[in-house]
Amino acid sequence: MQVALAGCRKLGNWGIGGAGGRPWDRADKPPVEGLRARGATVSTPAWDDPGVDWASFDTVLIRATWDYHHHRDAFVAWAERVGAATRLLNPAPIIAWNTVKTYLRDLPVPQPETVWIERAEEVRPALAERGWGTAFLKPIVGATAEGTLRFDDASVAEDHVRRLGGHFLLQPYLATVGDVGERSAIVIGGEVTHAVRKLPVPGDYRVQDDYGATDEPATLTEAELELVAATMRALPEPVAYARVDWLTDDEGQPRLIELELVEPCLFFRHGPGAAERLADIVRG
């Protein structure tokens, strides 16, 4: 069986080894080993490499495609081509839906109040109407906290929107990210395999290890499990892998902030057996 773990051309310090001639994300070592143990030949081509014959693979698993948000339309077109030629995980329609954060509108679960911003001039009235002091901006197409902004000055936010362009979601800033942290459930083949708590460095809000954040295993509450279950029930079709992210509000209730279905870190180091489960799904 020929399996491709689709990645990108530049992995920086996260790239290791070389499966199929290219470096690959060190976090994916467990599923790579699991696939090889099951007799699969694993390659790690870049998603935008024009020389790759994607139809030659039995399955293409999207993993370290970390630059997709800079080329979203091209990435979705690639997913559609690959999905028409072979088995793509996750499926192309899911990729198209999940690469724009307006997908959050389709999920009937508790979320932070959100205002969808198309122009800088919309920021100040939205803040005034809701009485938000410190607030948060996030591009509707983005990854790894790129283009996000925590602010308490509307003029700073207006300048940010003008400078970056595009559309944003505007939310109240949930300060619990600093002490409770962001919490995530990893779902493989429809089952929660493990959960993590991610903590930013003091004074920051970004929970990616790119910014020095730390992570640890977590045990989910009943309310968190219900949030995860309700989120997954709302998906338009089944997926091989998912990461559900949330923050707690001031009352301690979980509020969905992201559903990652494209290239999420799945924190295999905190989930014994999760990588093997994913390998079984890929192997079919």
Image (cartoon, helix red, strand yellow):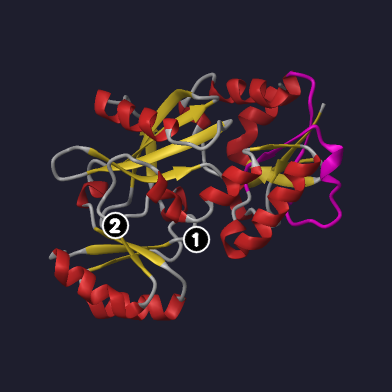
Query: In the rendered view of the protein, which quadrant contains the C terminus?
Result: top right
> In this view of the protein, can residue 45 be seen by the observer?
no
For residue 28, above or below residue 13: above
Measured from the top left, where is residue 209 in percent x and y? 45, 48
Give the extent of the magenta segment. Answer: 38-64
Q: In this view, does 270 lie above or below 248?
A: above
Give whichever of 4, 234 is nearer the camera.
Answer: 234
**Is residue 230 located in the magenta-colored stretch of the structure?**
no
Q: What numbered label is drawn on residue 114?
A: 2
Disc 2, SS: loop
> Residue 119: horizontal and vertical position, in percent?
37, 77
- The residue that mark 1 highlights is 141
- Give the prevailing secondary structure in the magenta stretch: loop
Count of number-bearing discs:
2
Q: Residue at x 53, y 27 (%)?
A: 188
**Dot 1: within a 10 Å radius of its alpha carbon, few (fewer than 14), some, or many (20 or more) residues?**
many
Between 222 and 37, the one lying in front of the other is 222
- Whole-percent x and y of residue 132? 16, 64
Q: Residues within 10 Å of mark 2 (few under 14, many from 20)?
A: some
Nearer the observer, 201 or 272: 272
Q: Nearer the viewer, mark 1 or mark 2?
A: 2
The residue at 72%/53% (across/down) is 78
